[in-house]
Image (tube, helix red, strand yellow):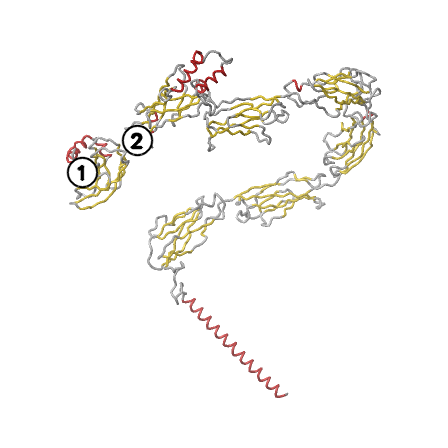
Amino acid sequence: MTPIVHLLLLPLLLSAVTGEGLQDKKGPFENTALDVAEDTPVPYPIHKFEVTDPGVDGFRLSGEGSDDVKISSEGWLFLQHPLDWSKNDHYIIGVEALKEGSVVHGPIYVTINVLDINNHAPAFNSSDYTAVVLEHSPAGVPFTRVFASDLDDPASPNARLKYSLVSQIPNKHHTALFQINAETGEISTTAEGAEMLKAREGIRYSRGEDQSIDALKTKFDHFCSPVQSIPYEQNPFFTCVERAEVRRRSIDLVEDPDYTLIVRVQDLGGESPNALSGSTYVKVIVKENLWVNPGPIIIKENLKEVYPHVITQVQSNDPNALYRLVQKERVLNFPFRISVDGEIELTEELDREDKDMYILVVFAEDQYGNQLDPPMEIQVVVQDVNDNAPECEEESVFEVQENEPVGSLIGAFLAHDADDATTLNAQLTYSIVSQTPSASANAFSIDPMLGEIRALQVLRRRDSKMYHLDVQVSDPVFSVQCKVVIKVIDVNNELPLFETKDYGSHSLAEDTPVGHTLLTLKATDADEVESGSSKIEFHISEGNEDGIFAVQTEENGVGELVVVKPLDFETSSSYNLKIDARNPEPLMKGLEYGSESSTSVQLAVTDVDEAPEFSMDILDVTVPEDIAQGTVLLKVEAKDPEGKDISFKLDGDSQGWLEIDAASGEIKTKNKLDRETLETFSVTVTAFEKDNPEKSSEHELSVKLLDINDHYPTLTETKSFICYNKPAPVLIKAKDADAPPFSEPFTFAFSHGKKSPNWDLQAVDGSTAKLTLKKSPGADKTFALSINIKDNAGVGVNQAFEVQVCNCTELGYCYVEPGKHSFMLGMGATIGILAGILGFCIIAFVVVIRRIGKKKEKTENVEEKNAML
């Protein structure tokens, strides 16, 4: 269709557009960006430029897309040919408005963005794929990948692809053996596939092994022993194996795959019914996985073999693989190695007591060190043999109280065997071989499995204080004799006795320091020395409810009565203490502690004149700085332990802001407080006895002042200059003595509240503004500006700022002509300066005349003296 026909059709097309739609397509003659979908039917009106000049009678286009985009004389921009996003995603077109062929407006530039539509179906880069998967491959590990592309806009959903498996052929068990990653196209086995995939059966050959018919006969004889006397050609079993092997070798796995997968790809993320799609075939061949873990491998310790000894073999799926063996744990001794054929060899005997398991890591790599199969971990378990005899301590000692009933447990005797505790090799049995003294034979028994020793008779110290036993400990192969000592301990049948039942009365001052020893206690016990029955411990059982005293137990029945808390005469002036002596071992049945195992002591506390005590430990006050004069900040309280009259005083008030009522303790403001002078300060409050001021106590009072908005921002500098030949902004800085939120950030504005034709004022940060000269005066001139600066709370005043606009030197300072000054003095100042200069000259003249007269007089005196001489 020709452009002329398009122009003829354009009015008809425009008439079909609703008024609202037509209005949306109109706009002023200015730079414009427009969106147009590709493959839009033509002719298509894009936009109409409205020009205010009534004389405009035409338009002209230039730049890209002049063949596809046209403009009418009325200013309608329209498509002549459909656009194709894949060829060009945007066009930049220049538009000029013409009047009688001359340009009167423009050019302006129109950017036409071509919007992609979903008009390309995704396509795979191959119509079919071939992939190999090893049987028992881990689920979810990709073994191949398909790839598709889409010619639509990759940044749009039109090119967002989704992969899916349509079908799996064959699928006899109706089980999905394969899965595909919907985003990447990676194909892997499912959990069921990892378990069910099997390779076609065949004869396994080692690396470099002959695969001829003769070799097949050898393998047949090996697996079908005893060797058959029937000729191979007449043996139906061999001929069956031979045909199967020949058929397996001749099959083209690409033409006859194990599985065929149909894979589909969709654009629009596969989420739209309008999505376009493509498909491909994936032929999957299942190969036998020779890389199979042979572990765990069990090897007896101390195995007598010819070393190196082959313990297992691994085989890579690649017949040319190179094997490497390492140990997972970092142990110095590594008694294993691997051959070129994958045979793992043990190089020496193993000892389970040194190490009971090894983890070997086998790598199958190519000549460049690249892995051909995933690393394989093989466990080697060292099996225990009974090569260790039981072990016991040089001598085991047990204690038992005398008179314990028959069958009482004395203790459990345990030995150790280094062999595997989970086997019979470490199963121990116990028996008593001999007893010393032997006068009371069979005094003890031992459990043969648990090693528990029990008394078979009542033991008495007068019969024997100690028994020695020889205990035999045996495992299924070895035996050892161990020494056991049993001590018969004295029973606690004697009571501890104090040296006196009353330690009398004692006095002590109430300021006696903590830790002071008041007296020493002594008690004795007739039980066996150095036994728990004769050891004595002291306890205060009465009169010490506040825990003021304690008895520190020493050796040999000695105790120290000490003060462990401060004394207070006013709280308690006397104490009657009862102190008990006790054994840590329980008394013999039927025996109880009596009065002979207790003593008493009376303590009288004497009064001491003590200093007054404050009722509060911490004195902190926080008040606003504008608090009224005479306001009570705090009332301190103190009392004298003896009830004497006290008074208060205040020290350390460097500003003279506070005062204290000596009688009541009220602390008041004496003068105006100022946070900007001192935000926090401390004073010392002293409470003292009126009649004895030396008896005093001190407390520190900390005062913190809260800020109020009692300052406004002020300029740090009130003058500056600007070079009109090189105008640069002037930075205006302000400061405020208040603290947040009554200080920064500041707001800067001209006092008249309007925009200035010559100046521009903009904030830079919370404390700085930038003053810019908008219009240069062209000559030296000084401006007096009034700037209003307010703090964050809106408090501020107008402040004068003087700016000299001048011609500057290369160094950036205002230029001053030689012989001139940058300032002129008034008439009064000029007369004063002249009078001062004249006065100075007169004074200098008088001084010179006087000095000449003195010099002449001195000369005459010298001459007269010389004449006399």
Count of residue discs: 2
Above or below: residue 808 compared with residue 579 = below
Question: Residue beneath label 1, please?
Answer: 72
Q: Earlier in the sequence, mark 1 or mark 2?
A: 1
Q: Name which quarter of the figure residue 783 lies in.
A: bottom left
Q: Are marks 1 and 2 in contact (CB under 8 Å)?
A: no
Q: Secondary structure at mark 1?
A: loop
Q: Tell me the mark number nearer the camera, choosing from 1 and 2.
A: 2
678 left or right of 51 in image: right
Q: Can you tell which mark lies on residue 151? A: 2
State the separation of the CA atoms marked 1 and 2. 34 Å
Residue at point 63%, 25% (across, down): 351
As shown in the figure, which amino acid type bears the numbered disc 1?
Ser
Above or below: residue 535 compared with residue 842 = above
Q: Name which quarter of the figure residue 450 lies in.
A: top right
Q: Locate the C terminus and report the quarter of the image it occupies.
A: bottom right
As shown in the figure, which amino acid type bears the numbered disc 2?
Leu
Front position in the image: 724 or 502: 724
Above or below: residue 837 compared with residue 546 = below
State the image coordinates of residue 598 (x, y, percent, origin top left): 80, 27
Q: Locate the N terminus and report the quarter of the image it occupies.
A: top left
651 left or right of 178 in image: right
Q: Secondary structure at mark 2?
A: loop
Q: Can you tell which mark lies on residue 190? A: none
Residue at point 45%, 43% (across, down): 793
Give the crowd class for mark 2: few <14, some 14-19, many >=20 residues within 10 Å.
some
Q: Name which quarter of the figure residue 72 lies in.
A: top left
State the image coordinates of residue 329 (x, y, percent, origin top left): 57, 29
Front position in the image: 303 or 440: 303
